[in-house]
Image (cartoon, grey):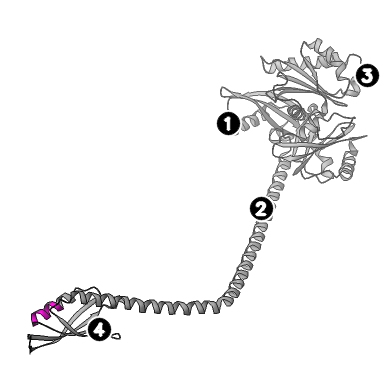
Amino acid sequence: MAQRLVLEWTRTMLHAAVAEGRAATWRVRAIYAQPLSTAAETAHVLGALIKTAKLPTEEVITVVSREQVITRMVKFPTLDSAELTQMVELYAKAQLPYPREQTVMDFSVLRQQGGFSTVVVVACQRDVIDRQLSALRELKITPRFVTVSSWGVLGWYRHAVKSGAVKEPVLVINVDQTRTDLVLIANRHIISSRSVSQGAQDWASLSETAQLLALEAERSRSSIRKELPGTDISAVILTGLGALDQWKEQMAQRLGLPVTVIAAGAAFSAVKTLPQACSPVIVGGVACADTRMLLNLSPSEVQGQVRHRQQVRELSLVGALLIAVLALGARALTLHVSRQRQMASQLERVLKELGPTAKQVQEKGRVTQAVASILNDRRQFAAALAGMFRQTPPTIRLDTVTFEASRRELIVRGNAPSTQAVLEYRKALEQVAGIASVELKYTSQRATAAGDRTDFELLLLQRAGAS
């Protein structure tokens, strides 16, 4: 199962979250918080945390604060993704307050209807991102994504709040130690976000915290009304650090909206111990988010390195799979050959054992076949002989009937009243089944006391196919 590491650091704290999963399904299994004295020690503290907690670094996502980016909501006359990318690029060159080469940017589509696309363009100075990446470069880590804290709030909201449980658009207020994020969400997408540099440690020293938070919510409401006329806040969710339950009622009265308090750990049931020094919403929300929904402010060269590394990993995986397939194929072939040899050996042994028996059976078969052939010949001879006798009329007397087995011939001698009677007798014998031909060998007349008689000899050839 794949693992990812999400990192965020503020002026005073380093936050880290580890999640495991794949595709769009991720589960946070650990969240860490380490204090920072100065920004210069970020790499040292992070390296020590990675070593002691054995954090994975194959897939790393780092988070920048919403305060460090600028956003613009723009409507473009296209629904095509390629055209939309080109239009956003042209807009960035013409409208952003920084030169394009000193800026990193990305955009998120809010809605598409009537042939128009409404998008949020997010831009950040390149120096800010480079400072964010410098600590990771010291540790030889290349992040896959550089995203914005607002998208961590969105990821947390999607996991902590069931669809339809809160009326949208909903303003999610996450109070961290030194920062407060206000993210307006509709249809489970960000439509507006703000961040203020006061956090739980600042609000704790003030008696009017609820009024100040309500004031910030009012500012978010005014901003969205200007950017998207007709859009208003329907509910508020409070999460993070601080006396949230105490602020809830006062904010609801001030805003005239339902305010719900949801524990920051509600989306991270698998985490046994949550750090008390920070709100886990940002790093945890990014860790369990689908990366296809994240904003990415990585510089182009970093994105190229990530793509190259991913391609190398995929090629390595394909190569390993190919080697595994070849190894399995060779193993299967070896097993097949071995089995064939075993079968051949067994068959040879069985044949040797059955050899004498097979010869006896073969000999008995030959004897049986010979006996059957002889019996068949005898049956056919008997049938031919019986047919001959049936065709012999009373006027013809048979003296001798001789059978030459080697030549399959019947020699019939006798006498008849006349030569004509002999010829008719011959013709009748030719119709007997099993007789191939009848040959008249001779006839001779002689006188007897009863009158003249014709002696004859006939040669009957038995059919060859009858044997």
What whole-number distance in Å separates the C-alpha atoms at marks 3 and 2? 58 Å
Q: Residue at x 69, y 55 (%)?
A: 320
Q: Amino acid at mark 1?
A: Asp
Which residue is at the front of the view, 103 or 160? 160
Label 3: how many Cα within 10 Å (few below 14, some 14–19, many 20+)? few
Residue at image mark 4? 409
Whichever of labels 3 and 2 marks the residue nearer the N terminus, that label is: 3
Residue at image mark 3? 205
Q: Is residue 4 above or below residue 151?
A: below
Q: Amino acid at mark 4?
A: Glu
Label 1: how many Cα within 10 Å (few below 14, some 14–19, many 20+)? few
Which residue is at the front of the view, 425 or 27? 425
What whole-number distance in Å separates the C-alpha atoms at marks 2 and 4? 85 Å
Whichever of labels 2 and 4 marks the residue nearer the N terminus, that label is: 2
Which residue is at the front of the view, 53 or 135? 53
What whole-number distance in Å separates the C-alpha atoms at marks 2 and 1? 34 Å
In magenta stretch: residue 422: yes
Q: Where in the figure is residue 208, as x and y percent of width and height?
A: 89, 13
Residue at image mark 1? 80
* Magenta-highlighted residues: 416-425
What whole-number distance in Å separates the C-alpha atoms at marks 1 and 3? 51 Å
The mark closer to the camera, 2 or 4, is 4
Whichever of labels 1 and 3 marks the residue nearer the N terminus, that label is: 1
Q: Where in the figure is residue 229, as x and y percent of width and height?
A: 66, 15
Q: Kindly indicate the quadrant of the structure image that contains residue 392.
A: bottom left
Q: Amino acid at mark 3?
A: Ser
The mark closer to the camera, 4 or 3, is 4
